[in-house]
Image (tube, helix red, strand yellow):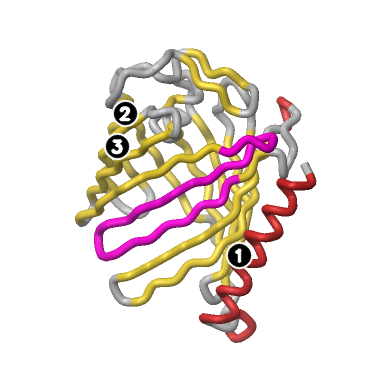
Amino acid sequence: MKTIYNNILIAAAAVVIAGGALAPVAHAEVEVSASVGVANMYYWRGLNLGNGDAAVFGDLAVSAGGAYGGIWASSGDAAAGTEYNLYLGYGREMGDFNFDISAWTYAYPETEVDPGELVEIVSSLGFGPVALTYYHGLEDSKDYWYATAEVTFSAFNLKYGLHEDDLAHVDLSYAYNDHLSFTLGLVVNDAETSYTLDGVNYVEAYNNEPKFIVSLSLPIDF
């Protein structure tokens, strides 16, 4: 546990240092944003973690000068139950080039998974319509990874995702507007019929049937 918390502190320090070197946060305007949304399933990296049940989610974030932090919460995880995620990050855009690095910790009160037990460091690089993202996770001192490559043209996004155990998926998404989106997801390789995350087994999460996801998110005005 101590090692995982140290990794969070290291990642947070790196974000703050990068932010201080590139854009003084003290002189940036602080913005607060929030949203609530609903989706017809809990779709996560090619998997249906809600066994087809709808998911309700919400987000509260604070940002300034490229630095940001907040909390994201969701229902719909059939095995682990309701979750909330705490995150801290820094990102910048410089012409066609952009980058982002963040630290996330995931908590599941119903299954007694506390903040700090499941941590991810997420880094991404983008140039024009192309983006590469790498997720490195720490779960009870066991490392794991997940990576994506995606390209965006107008309202369409095509993403390829690969888990460390060779599970691969492809998502084709269409953003009707800033609030409503549609995604068609498909596992593209042979896979087992279960997935384990933080000791929780998700039965039949690896099925190769296409998944169609409708997601609606609305901002909350303060």
- Mark 1 in CB contact with mark 3 (< 8 angstroms): no
Tell me where residue 86 appears, x and y as whole percent: 65, 50
Residue at point 64% right, 83% down? 26
* Residue under the image location 67 percent in, 60 percent down: 10
Could you tell me what secondary structure mostly forms the magenta stretch?
strand
- Label 1: few (<14), some or many (≥20) within 10 Å? some
36 vs 143, nearest the viewer: 143
Q: Quadrant of the N terminus?
A: top right
**Magenta residue check for 126:** yes
Which mark is drawn over residue 62? 1
**For the residue labelled by badge 3, is the local secondary structure a helix, a strand or a loop?**
strand
Q: Is residue 56 above or below residue 105?
A: above
The quadrant of the image that shows the C terminus is: bottom right
Q: Residue 210 colored magenta?
A: no
From mark 2 to mark 3, how far is it between C-alphas?
10 Å
Per the rendered image, the range of residues in magenta is 120-143
Asked whether, in this view, residue 134 is left or right of residue 56, the answer is: left
Q: Earlier in the sequence, mark 1 or mark 3?
A: 1
Residue 171 is tagged as 3
Q: Residue furthest right?
A: 2
Q: Position of residue 42 (x, y in %)?
A: 47, 30
Residue that numbered label 2 is attached to:
212
Looking at the rendered structure, the kind of residue marked 1 is: Val
Question: Where does the image place residue 8, in percent across and percent down from the top left?
Answer: 68, 54
